[in-house]
Structure formats: C-alpha cells, structure tokens
Amino acid sequence: MASISLQNIAKVYPGGTKAVRDINIDIKDGEFIVLVGPSGCGKSTLLRMVAGLETITEGKAKIGDKVVNHVEPADRDIAMVFQNYALYPHMSVYNNLAYGLRNRRKPKDEIDRRIREAARMLEIEQYLERKPRALSGGQRQRVAMGRAIVREPEAFLFDEPLSNLDAKLRVSMRGEIKRLQKRLGTTSLYVTHDQLEAMTLADRLVVLNGGEIEQIGTPLDVYHKP
Ligand code: ADP
Ligand code: ADP
C-alpha cells in the first residue's frame, strides 16, 4: 500500500472544458477516501487521472514517492474496479482473475495461490469455472473485486462500482468492500454520487462541486456541521 498525493491538479479537456482545478488531496497509507458530488463535478476525471487514463493538464500526482504524471496505466501499481465489471465474457472466472497476472508473467503457482486466496475472501470459490454470464450481478461484482485484489496493488481505484446493483445488494456489497479494504489495508480512492454510500465507506470524504473541492473531512465533519 502507498500514500497518494495530488498537488495543484487541474484538467482542461481538448475543446476547453475545465473539468477540475486547484485539487490538493493527501491520502494516507491505508486510508479510504471517497470522492462525492453531483454529476459533472469532476469525480471521474480525477480518478481517471490517478489511474493514468487521462493526462494531467497541471499539477503533480504521486503514488508513494513516485511522480506518476507520465507513467502508463499498466505501469502504475493500482487496480481499478468499474461499475460495468469489465470482465472478459468468453473466459471463465478463474481465467478472468489470472489474465492480468499472466500478462505480468507471474509464476503459475503464485497466480493460483492469489486466485484461491481472493476467491475464498470473496466467497466465489464455487464459481471459478463458470463464465461471467452464468453469474448474478453481485457475483460478477465480486469477481471484478477479485481481479483488483489478485494484483496486490498499492491502491484500489473504484469508479461507481455498485451503481448497477439493486438497492439491497448495493448495501450488502458496500459493507463487504469496507471489510475487505480494512482487512487488506489497501489505500483506496472511491467515486460515487451516492451520499449514503460515501458516508458509510469513507475514512475521509472529498466533496467536489464545479470541479473544485468544497469540503474535505470525516463523514462526521462533513455531514454534521452546524
Ligand atoms: P463526474 O464524474 O463528477 O460526473 P466528470 O469528471 O465525468 O464528472 O466530468 C467533469 C466535467 O468534464 C463535465 O463538465 C464533463 O462534461 C467534462 N468531461 C468529462 N469527460 C470529458 C471528455 N472526455 N471530454 C470533454 N469533456 C469531458
Ligand atoms: P490487466 O489489467 O488485467 O492486467 P492488461 O494487462 O491487458 O489487463 O491491461 C490492459 C490495460 O487495462 C492496462 O493499462 C491495465 O492497467 C488496465 N487494466 C485492466 N484491468 C485493470 C484493473 N482491474 N485495474 C487497473 N487497471 C486495469
């Protein structure tokens, strides 16, 4: 795990949209930070810059003590979890979990160890040979979490991971993500527009509005201000 530091970050898209500016956030080792705010406030732009999926127009992003502005996504030690799961439909769950590790030429027994361990944690051991289409939405989301976990990254980046699930499942998966993150101690940056989700998950919240930080603090600080 590692700290993440965003220093004076701004993003201007080609065409001129100023998506975010003056962003300063210091995320501690093992901390769970939630970016929250209305649609269009710049949450996903910020997350995608940390992931390396968007260029950074201004400022500096660090993971640990490494500046990552010009580091390719595949060379950043992060794992992302998306709302659409991003699973390979023609591959079994096992192969979905193994794919990235095989690309990184991890030894076979190491890959197998990591997959068994993650599958046990996520209670998907009995589904390893199935294709994603034979799983429920909640099970697919667990596999998506599994793909992130097996990488043993320095940080998890979550992009509205629960927004495709029904309300009941969302609440139970929320608890599960929180438990897993605490157990693994992996620094996490989580994007949602759902205030309740944000409050439940966050060690600290970053409230964005119109591309700027409106508030940073614990859920108590942010939602119980007089
Ligand atoms: P959020 O995730 O909070 O909904 P976004 O980061 O997606 O917000 O968007 C922030 C602003 O940047 C919005 O005005 C949006 O229209 C704009 N934007 C997002 N992606 C692009 C893009 N690829 N090109 C141009 N403008 C974009
Ligand atoms: P994988 O990420 O499973 O190793 P690839 O090695 O083909 O798959 O990577 C394709 C690109 O997508 C890389 O830039 C990689 O970082 C990114 N990518 C795919 N899945 C994830 C994930 N779960 N977390 C972070 N990045 C991912």
Image: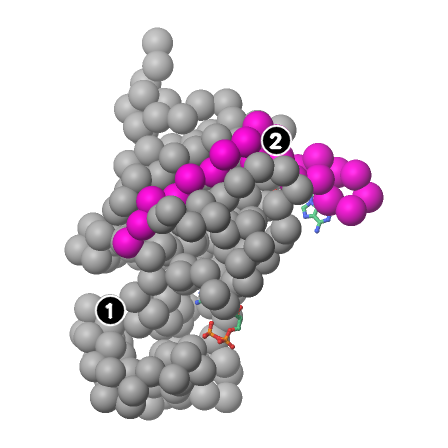
The quarter holding residue 59 reads: top right
Q: Which residues are magenta?
A: 1-22
Q: Nearer the viewer, residue 110 or 36?
A: 110
Q: Which residue is mark 1?
A: 122
The C terminus lies in quadrant: top left
Residue at 40 percent of width and 26 percent of height = 216
The N terminus lies in quadrant: bottom left
Ligand 2 within 8 Å of the CB at mark 1: no
The answer to whether any part of residue 93 appears in the image is: no
Residue at 27 percent of width and 44 percent of height = 29
Q: Is residue 214 left or right of residue 31?
A: right
Q: Residue 168: percent from the left, percent from the top? A: 34, 54
Residue 174 lies, with reference to residue 24, above or below; the image says below
Q: Which residue is mark 2?
A: 21
- Disc 2, disc 1: CB below 8 Å? no
Dominant secondary-structure state across the stretch colored magenta: strand
